[in-house]
Image (cartoon, rainbow, N blue to C red):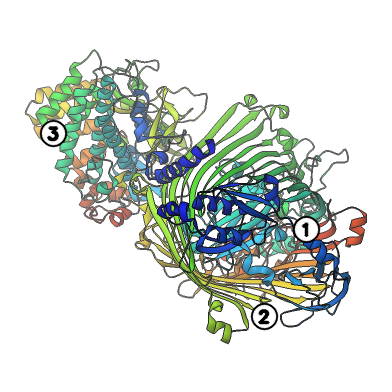
Amino acid sequence: MYRLIFLKYLPAGMIFLIILPGCRKFIQVDPPVSSITSSTVYTNNGTAASVVTGIYDQMEFNPTGLSDGDESIGYLTGLMSDELKSYNSSWNQYYTNSLSGTGTYFWREIYNQIFTTNAVLEGLAGATGVTAPMKQQLTGEVKFMRAFFYFYATLLYGDVPLATSTDYQVNNTLHRSPQSDVYKLVVQDLQDAQAALPAGYVNSSGAASSYRVRPNQGAATALLARAYLYLKDWTNAGDQASQLINNTATYQLDTSLNAVFLGANTGTSNKEAIWQLQPVSPGTNTWNGNNYVLTSAPGTGSGYVAMNDILYGAFEGGDKRQSNWVNSITTGGATYYYSYKYKIGTTNTSNPIIEYNMVLRLAEQYLIRAEAREQLGDSTGAVQDLNVIRNRAGLGDYAGPADKASLLAAILHERQVELFTEWGHRWFDLIRTGNINSVMGSPGNVCAAKGGHWDPNWALFPLPNQELINNRNLTQTLGY
Amino acid sequence: MKFTAVLLLAGCLQLSARSVAQITLSVKNAPIEKVLKEIKRQSGLAVVYPDALLLHALPVSVAVRDAPLDEALKRVFADQPFTYEIIAGKIISIKERETPVKMVLEEAATPPPMNIHGRVTDSLGNPLAGASVTVKGSKRGTQTNQDGVFIIMEVDPNAILVVSFTGYETKEVKLNGKTDMYVQLKHVAASLQDVVINKGYYTTTQRLNTGDVTKVTSADIEKQPVSNVLQALQGRVPGLVITQQSGIPGTGFKVQIRGQNSIGNGTDPFYVVDGVPYNSQMPFGSTVNSMINGTLHGGNPLNYINPYDIESVEVLKDADATAIYGSRAANGAILITTKKGKAGVMRPEASLTYGVTEPAHHLPLMNREQYLTMRREAFKNDGMLPKPTDYDINGTWDTTRYTDWYKVLSHNPASYLNATTTISGGNANTQYLLSTDYYRQSTPFPKLLPGDGLDQRASVHFNVSASSPDNKFKAVMSGSYAADKNTVQPIDFTSASYAPDAPALFNPDGSLNWAPLVPGQAGTWNNPLSNLYNKYHNSTSNLVSNLTLTYNILHGLQANVNLGYTNLQTNAIQTNPIAANDPGRNVTSGRAQFGESNGHTWIIEPQLNYNIRVGKGTFSASLGSTFSSTNSSAQALNATGFVSDALLQNVQAATSVTITSNSAQYRYDAMYALLNYNWEDKYILNITGRRDGSSRFGPSNQFANFGSVAGAWIFTREKWAEEHLSFLSFGKLRASYGITGTQPSTDYQYLNLYTVTYNPYNGTKGSYPTSLFNPDLAWEVTRKLEGGIEIGLLEDRINVQASYYRNRSNNELLSMPLSMVTGFSSIPSNLPALVQNKGLEIMINTVNIRTRDFSWTSSFNISRNRNKLVSFPNLANTSYASQFIIGQPLNIMRLFRYLGVNKETGVYQLADAKGNPTYSPAYNVDNNILMDMTPGFFGGLDNKLQYKHFTLDFLFQFFQQKAENVVGIYSGNPGIMNNEPTLYLDRWRKPGDVTRYEMFSQSGANESYYVTNYVSSSGLAYGDGSYARLKSLMLQYELPDKLKQKAHLKHFQVYMEGENLLTITPYFGYDPESQSNYMPPARVWTFGLRMGL
């Protein structure tokens, strides 16, 4: 009897099993335990925050990344402008201003990071397991980061494609968007970030932190001030800078020049720092220090660049920045100067990490406001701000002519000696102020001195040639 | 015992049967119980009988339509030893016959016995010597003599003679009083046509097969002293190329069936062991095996299946055979079936094989004088004097010393051992087989301890089949477990090129000699034996188990389910102790690498089968499904900083540990259907279809359809063929077309994964996306077209099978370049590149001689495959641009044109794109000579000779191909402090010399030194790599029957077996098969005996 029942239901059971494979559920698999997928990342605070942490980590991990070291924006644009002198033929294309589409430059890294910011924004939008405060913080951070990378993208390349999603099919066919649209996104993202981010500094779990290694509201304000400056929106630039300058409880210039590039909370409170990146390779402080500090003649192993004579000669007598932020080595009868903002060049696992890669600091805000005030006709205010920076460097008050052109030139000069080798300020200032052709191109000027020649189109970078092949909608930068 | 058909009429007929009792039956050789049941059903009458009575029942064959009950019963009981009686019109009672015994006695008693003589021939009239002639029902019998003649004394005139001969149909002849017999036996084509072919979800015969399947059986596998069944397949299967990566036991294999279909996903076929999918590569082999002991080249999962447990291997090639495996079998499928028990008394068997192994060949290197001449000449050519570090020639080392390093390091005694025991037996309903095996092989490298340099495997295998008495229900369970311990040295000394005057290995006190200049300081050489302190230990266990349940629901309808589980686990450790280092170098810490991997798969496959006669043919259909899941994981630890060698096995003692870990889950389900229609064994149509779902496909492409259509026409069954093509004993044309696929080779390729950052940032670890989400990721599609002809000539003494195929693969799984604006520069994607493989395969089996004492059969196969990249849109913009050329094979080499040695300067010359001589040509510009590395043709020739009790079997394997030779493989400039192959002695010495090789040089003093980099990509470094190899040889002696009977043995064989015995090749290098400087496949010579009780 039992067997008969078995027999009766067997075919039905078999047919059920045979028809079943139509269902998708069976072939849904768990992701590998060694990695996570986007579907699991945004299910809790910890993993969601880790992706944003990953952005900062990646910026500092890579010794050849855009943030820090010998392929950073500061280093390479320093070679292209009048800040550095090359002792390595590999840098010739930068040093002699002869870029070509064979390099990928910062393009790959910028858009890889922009992808991450878009992925986080998309992930958080549908996230249910991430708490509201964390969602707000992370949204603020990645909006800030997206603005940061697009800001640099447009500074380097002019019109750039605006990828605002992770859909590769869309992003693979984008045209370049006009620079004005890029700025629009940058300003919008920064305003969103300003609204979303806390005024104080927090860590990856949202708790208050004495480190300044994750962007906060101040960082958004600082970058917004700079963006307005580049947009020649002087009122807003000055207002944003004022917010930071007036917030003396959090931000103050450090009286000791040698402490400016130390990490906040590493034996100093460093209130000048608005946003720093913490080095992540054990035993190595900044890659900048690693590459600028010379312990032998440049090109012989310790480093491959020295300071350009033009920059060294730009300091006024008695400028403490020249004695504190510039150092030299004399070898083989020659003296080489080098950028000494970061002082630790050696790598040793027992080295404590005390120097952090400075991204945004208060001194720049004074100079932004000085320029904005001058442009709005407030020369008194402009000189006041200028003098704050001069005085900190041991120089007396500005005593030059008070006409607008002279004052603007003075501010530009002050930026040159204050912000040198930091994040390409010099190169982008030359472009922004329209001085690039006269500085680089006039006969006997910078470019000729470096052994190259100048084309006004070369202020912008070329796109990697492969990009034009892979996306036919992209066009090469004019002049390449 | 088989119903060919039972025709059941509708229920209304049954109702009328109650009164009129009209019976309709059509059965052939059916059990009487079934027939009675049917009569009972149709008539409504009860049937009663004593159980014991029916034990003597004969099978019933009856065909009646609407017959009265009585007549039907009469017909059914006509030949039975019992009869029936209808009681009261309601009960059929079965009872014994009253007279039959008496009648038989009477008949037996009457005629007197007589003497019979006769002659046995084949159908052509040739006498068959040694045919067996027995009297049915008795133990009496004899054998035919040389002329096919036999005599049997005193035989009952009504007796039946049974005449049989191996390879021929057995015939029963009724004497009917005749004393002179002439018996013709029909040859059963050895019976190639009747060989049962396993096609995965169903079986067929070679005769009725619509697809292309090559079967290799245990008979061929068992006579080769191999450790991996793949070695035993080499040279035996048309279209199959198996390359052993090295001769070290436990090494990896490359397997390719009919060329390379996939550009980026390898050529591994789909393996199935007893119905359970089996790994083609070790789970995460790159993480564990390769990282730890590179000499094993990743290993191979089939190393953990005992080849002697294998009953047969079926290699499935065309669409008809492979489409049923859907997205997994574009590269063909290899089905492995393990041994099963056979009904009969218990049969214990044991065998022992022992032998020696050595590298199959070696490359002769220079002796001391030649070496020293080379060195001195090199310095002279360079215009330089030996430096203080040129110890071999500057007086530091004793130049009168001579060591043949090949002999010392690569030619030590090595052995092969295999011991098996098997017990099998059973009865009609239950059969069993239990076997054990122990295998051990050592390397020819020096050993520090007796346990070093060994690959050992112990395995057990069982198979049990059981069926219910009515054969309705059947269960087959099988399992194999193997435990393998591999301790081969993590170094391959084959290419060791120490100077022949290098110092002695040992100091007088027995310690390693490092020959320091100043005692206590660093030595002047790396003592090769120090490598032996680096220990490797790999424990791998493998379980393959399977249970198949079959239930015959109704006549013609059957359900079965196949359940399987496999588990492959590896633990490996390699230690690099302080002791392996020169004490003069003050190394104070050791290293160890630990690796483990684990992969397990389960599968459930329910299936329904239905058979029915339709018209003059048989229609069969199957419907089934598959659920399968594979989980694999691996972990590798690299631990450094051990201060004591004693603590190397303990990870805790390391100061620094880095961990690499991997895991993957793979799920697969499918639904499949098979339809087959066979019209009188003349026309056969076979249709297969499969719908696959795989976790390796992107979410929008998780399901895919595959299928095939095939037909076969056995034209020798046509009347006209019987008349006009009578020389053909068999002829079949077949054709197939279908679609199969290739899955992505690794899991998760479509997923957008995040990986954890290496270092923490401000106290917490970050993560970052590593790949794009690609929901569209799909399978590669291979469309296979094949036509074949199979013919048998001279009564199937010659069998020829030829197939032509064309496989075209597209939708290739490759990385598609993307604009970096997407965040990544490429994405795993299906590109419309089209790869074509077409070729011809011929297999010829012949029975050359067959007499009573001597027979000789041959099997020959030859294959040719042409590979071509038909199209690859946008190739120039992909990372594959420098590797592939449209219109050329995938494995094309781009070489520099070689212009020979400049007579005046003595330096190699290459041509640039314009043909001008140069020493420094440019890659991708000047390397325009194309060389196709695909074998031109390849195959094998197997001969079996049997004379009385001796059997000789030898297999030749051959390849016509181009190969990279020693100039490319053996790096380094002749002239530096490395010994070199003697072929470099043909070098340039003075202006005017015309030589094959350039002058010796030991430094970058002139172009001759640098040009060698380019020459290794020129015509000088590539050349003929064709070879013919005596792959295996077996000579066996079977004890004569009389002696066996005395010793109470069923069989007793002694044999000698050899593997890779002889290679004939114009190739300059170690081995044309592996084309590398790894240890060539081992030559094995063994002696063994096998006996069975």
Vertical placement of B13 versus A391: above or below?
A: below
Tell me the SS state at disc 1: helix
Vertical placement of A161 versus B1051: above or below?
A: above
Question: Which residue is denoted by mark 3 in the rendering?
Answer: A406
Question: Which residue is denoted by mark 2 in the rendering?
Answer: B794
Task: Give the amino acid type for the residue marked by disc 2 in the picture.
Answer: Leu
Q: Tag 1, which chain?
A: B
Q: Nearer the viewer, mark 1 or mark 3?
A: 1
Q: Tag 3, which chain?
A: A
Question: Which residue is denoted by mark 1 in the rendering?
Answer: B101
Alpha carbons under labels 3 and 2: distance apart: 111 Å
Give the x, y percent position of residue A38. Answer: 35, 35
Q: Nearer the viewer, mark 2 or mark 1?
A: 1
Q: Nearer the viewer, residue A443 or A119?
A: A119
As drawn, the residue found furthest toward the left would be A377
> Could you tell me if residue B782 is visible in this image?
no
The answer to whether dots 2 and 1 both sit on one chain is: yes
Instruction: State if disc 1 and disc 2 touch (CB < 8 Å).
Output: no
Q: Tag 2, which chain?
A: B
Residue occupying image coordinates x 49% and y 30%: A347
Give the x, y percent position of residue B397. Answer: 80, 50
Task: Give the amino acid type for the residue marked by disc 3 in the picture.
Answer: Ser
